[in-house]
Image (cartoon, rainbow, N blue to C red):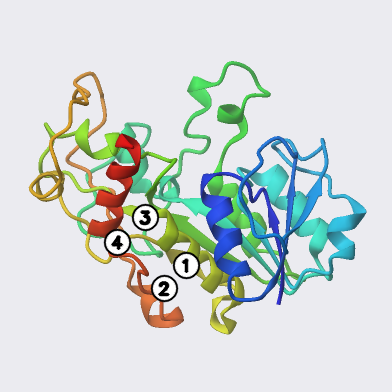
Amino acid sequence: MRVLVIGGTGFIGAHIVRQIASHEHAVAVYHRGLTQAVLPDQVERITDSRSVMPIQDFPSESFEFNPDVVILTVAMGAVDAGAAVEAFAGRAGRIVLLSSGDVYRAYGRFTGIEAGPIQKGLLTEDAPLRSVLFPYRHKASSPGALEYWYEKILAERAVLNAPDLPGAVLRLPKVYGPGGNDDLATVYRYRHHPNWRWTHGFVENIAVAVELAALHPAAGGRIYNVGEAYTPTIAERLAWLPPSTIEPDLSSQFDFTQDIAYDTSRIRVELGYCEVVPEKEGLLRTLRSSSD
């Protein structure tokens, strides 16, 4: 297979590229050229100064590569996801979007932008989505800022509604690993909310899930939650994690009675996904990397 990764040099993207290339697929990366990730020698690099978010232009080299699959690692809203769909419709056989759990209504309840009662239980892919769009717009410094136009719900719609380009969506958890969230502050700073649950995922495991969504015949047109098979409470994590000097976040106004915990059974059943690194091992490996 021939796989084009749009933005494949960042923390998550580089792992995806290495994972897919390790199975002898042809991989090309389209990026600005500012981040020089360590990638296999056989990976083709397509650099262009126009590949600044939101990416709306694609050089001729990206089409000449003749991708079977296009993976969008940095599409954040309707504009860039729609541009990619329009550019590769009729040229590729599948487009894969990396999305987020912030699309769920439960996330809006957690942050306070969505009114209503707490949603109990795990979030399945069919759980209600937010009715309030642009969840970070109130933080934007200008209409050109990412926070202003970011909306993964609209990006998902663009990818899943493309008539001539089958799409797949992965709703990622809080991703961690060496070089990204490597102090696990997303656990330690909430130690004063011991019963709260937030699904995490080790970056190498996330890369495996993305490869499956890109290449598995059953993934076209589907949405998949990705992350731990079981999401521990903060207290359960801290029971076996080493102590940390990270200060607790006592000023947060979030509603910690609302869990952000995924049901990840769909990708496991339909695509045969399983972790290549046990999540506990991934957490400990990540902490060791931050102390080296």
Tell me the mark number nearer the camera, choosing from 3 and 2.
3
Query: Do the residues under discs 3 and 2 have CB atoms within 8 angstroms?
Result: no
What residue is shown with label 2?
A: 267
Disc 3 and disc 1: Cα gap in Å? 11 Å
Query: Do the residues under discs 1 and 2 have CB atoms within 8 angstroms?
Result: yes
Q: Earlier in the sequence, mark 2 or mark 4?
A: 4
What residue is shown with label 4?
A: 228
What residue is shown with label 3?
A: 202
Disc 3 and disc 2: Cα gap in Å? 16 Å
Q: Residue at x 40, y 65 (%)?
A: 126
Q: Earlier in the sequence, mark 1 or mark 2?
A: 1
Horizontal side, residue 91 vs residue 109: left or right: right
What residue is shown with label 1?
A: 209
Residue 66 drawn at (x, y percent) = 84, 69
Query: Do the residues under discs 2 and 4 have CB atoms within 8 angstroms?
Result: no
Quarter of the rendering occupied by the N terminus? bottom right
Q: Residues within 10 Å of mark 1 (few under 14, many from 20)?
A: many
Where disc 3 sits, the SS reads strand
Disc 1 and disc 2: Cα gap in Å? 8 Å
Residue 54 picture quarter = top right
Q: Earlier in the sequence, mark 3 or mark 1?
A: 3
Q: Residue at x 34, y 42 (%)?
A: 289
Identify which amino acid the numbered label 3 is placed on.
Answer: Phe
Residue 65 drawn at (x, y percent) = 84, 65
